[in-house]
């Protein structure tokens, strides 16, 4: 049986818990937390894994057909942290956790870290995208 590097990497879980894959010929790391929507645990996961990727240049939020919220933080090389415990579109713990996390990133990415920005998060639709 012939094993290719691409095939091998697509299925490997590296020693730090990232899914390693190929995209455009480059190795990418995807850190996916599995706290099933528990905001406090998601904030801790993000804080613990933030240093494992480069400078975050994009934050994307999507809500799937089952109503689950997924927030993806991407660096310029395509490495990602995918979280399930942040939310938007209402006031509550999930949106407040997203607000706090966006505020930690940098003012260039999310310049309105104040009560107004929490209102903006509460009014996000089914998905959002913030780019540097």
Image (spheres, grey):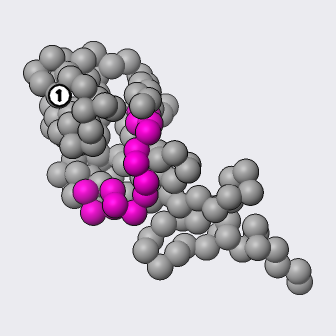
Q: Can you say which quadrant of the picture contains the N terminus?
A: bottom right
Q: Is residue 5 above or below residue 131?
A: below
**Direction right: furthest residue:** 1
**Direction bottom: furthest residue:** 1
Question: Residue 9 sits in which quadrant?
Answer: bottom right
Which residue sits at x=74%, y=57%? 25
Q: Please indicate, yes or no, whether residue 48 appears anywhere in the rendered image.
A: yes
Which residue sits at x=31%, y=31%? 108
Highlighted range, magenta: 47-61
Which residue sits at x=51%, y=53%? 79
Q: Can you say which quadrant of the picture contains the C terminus?
A: top left
51 sits to left or right of 11 = left
Question: Residue 118 sits in which quadrant?
Answer: top left
Please name the residue that numbered disc 1 is placed on. 113
**Residue 29 belongs to magenta span:** no
Q: How far across and down, in percent of the image, does residue 87 sit?
A: 29, 34
**In-front residue for pair 120/35:** 120
Q: How far across and down, in percent of the image, does residue 30 sit?
A: 50, 57
How many C-alpha atoms fall within 10 Å of the one at disc 1: few (<14), some, or many (≥20)?
Answer: some
């Amino acid at each position: 049986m012939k094993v290719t590097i691409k095939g091998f990497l697509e299925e490997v879980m590296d020693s730090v818990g990232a899914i390693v894959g190929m995209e455009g010929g480059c190795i990418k790391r995807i850190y996916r937390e599995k706290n099933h929507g528990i905001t406090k645990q998601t904030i801790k996961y993000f804080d613990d894994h933030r240093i494992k990727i480069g400078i975050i240049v994009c934050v994307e939020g999507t809500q799937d057909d089952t109503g689950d919220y997924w927030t993806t933080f991407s660096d310029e090389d395509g490495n990602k942290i995918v979280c399930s415990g942040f939310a938007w579109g209402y006031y509550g713990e999930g949106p407040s956790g997203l607000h706090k996390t966006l505020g930690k990133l940098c003012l260039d990415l999310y310049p309105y870290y104040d009560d107004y920005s929490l209102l903006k998060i509460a009014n996000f639709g089914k998905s959002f995208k913030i780019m540097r």
